[in-house]
Image (spheres, rainbow, N blue to C red):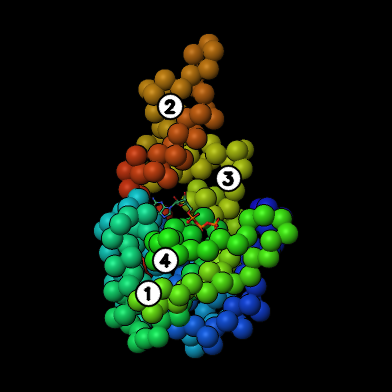
Amino acid sequence: MSSRGWYPGHMLVTQKAIRELAPYLTAFIEVVDARAPELTRHRPLASWIGRTPLILVMNKSDVADPAVTAAWVSWYETQNITAVALTASSQDAKGKLKAAITKRLKPPYRLSVVGLPNLGKSTVLNRMVGKNRVRTGGKPGVTRGPQWIRLDDGWEWLDLPGVVTPSKSRDWRLALLGVVPLDPGDAELIASRVWQLYYPQADDEGWVEWGRSRGFLVKGGAVDRQRAADAVITGFRTASLGRLSLEQPGDAAP
Ligand SMILES: Nc1nc2c(ncn2[C@@H]2O[C@H](COP(=O)(O)OP(=O)(O)OP(=O)(O)O)[C@@H](O)[C@H]2O)c(=O)[nH]1
């Protein structure tokens, strides 16, 4: 399915804007999902930003498989890409990301956060700038242009509406990760695939039996498949079913 038409156009950063801003920035911070970092990268970005460095933030590492995340960090090292595993929602995220940036780059620090929808860009930026974030948009008629946030430590963050459009929106994993909307009609298929990843030996309907054991039943005693499927998807997203990554270094290019 296409992502166009559901994500408000004014929130997308265009290629033109990124190309124009790149010379003013020390680096772009691209937020990806630690559970599928290559799948959730925005491929065209590297060419748009030219020589401006790119730092990958593998966010949501709290719900990814830690061993797979460690393998990704090592793999990115071999590719000469600075990649940081992060949990933007945790307190120590600011120190960790600052350390990674200062290790790689010299001041001045002028940075901006970009990435596909729902990966944690706002959470990362809020973590880095704290209470200094200025919100100018959200209301019709309020111009929401790029806004510089200058911090006491001398760091400057460009508050862009840094969403770029997913290009591989037909991949079921993007719906599972919340990068594109999940069509309710696809939930059962996605739940079945997720279940197979958790339990490779399970049969196709293993998740349905799990739903039964959880008491997700409709009148008459049959399993409420929609509810069971939704619970599997939520269980993956929150990692209550276990921390699971969807992509490993060395997987065929998505
Ligand atoms: N588990 C987990 N969830 C996170 C983390 N960071 C952000 N989230 C959640 O991910 C969701 C999206 O976070 P946002 O910061 O709004 O993401 P965004 O990329 O700015 O989203 P868009 O504005 O839609 O592009 C929210 O529900 C956050 O609470 C993290 O490190 N771990």
Compare marks 3 and 1 and give the one earlier in the sequence: 1
Calculate the distance from the C-alpha at mark 3 to the C-alpha at mark 1.
41 Å
Residue corresponding to mark 2: 211
Alpha carbon separation for disc pair 2 and 3: 20 Å
Q: Is residue 157 left or right of residue 153?
A: right
- Distance CA(mark 2)–CA(mark 4): 42 Å
* Distance between the alpha carbons at the discs numbered 3 and 4: 31 Å
Foreground: disc 2 or disc 4: 4
Instruction: Give the CA distance from mark 4 to mark 1.
Output: 10 Å
Q: Nearer the viewer, mark 2 or mark 1?
A: 1
Mark 3 secondary-structure assignment: loop
Q: Which mark is residue 152?
A: 1
Q: Which of disc 3 and disc 2 is earlier in sequence?
A: 3
Callout 2–callout 4 Cβ contact below 8 Å: no
Using a 10 Å C-alpha cutoff, classify the residue at mark 4 as few (fewer than 14 neighbours), some (14 to 19) or many (20 or more). some
For disc 1, the neighbor class at 10 Å (few under 14, some 14 to 19, many from 20) is few
| Type of amino acid under label 4 | Val
Q: Secondary structure at mark 2?
A: helix
What's the mark number on residue 182? Answer: 3
Asked if residue 14 lies left or right of residue 56, the reply is right
Dot placed on the residue nearer the N-terminal end, 3 or 4: 4
Tell me what residue is drawn at x 45 percent, y 34 percent.
231
| Secondary element at tag 1 | loop
**For this rendering, which residue is in front, 206 or 15?**
15
Query: Which residue is under mark 4?
Result: 129
Of all residues, the one furthest to the front in this rendering is: 152
Q: Position of residue 103 (x, y in %)?
A: 29, 81
Residue 131 seen anywhere in this rendered image of the structure = yes
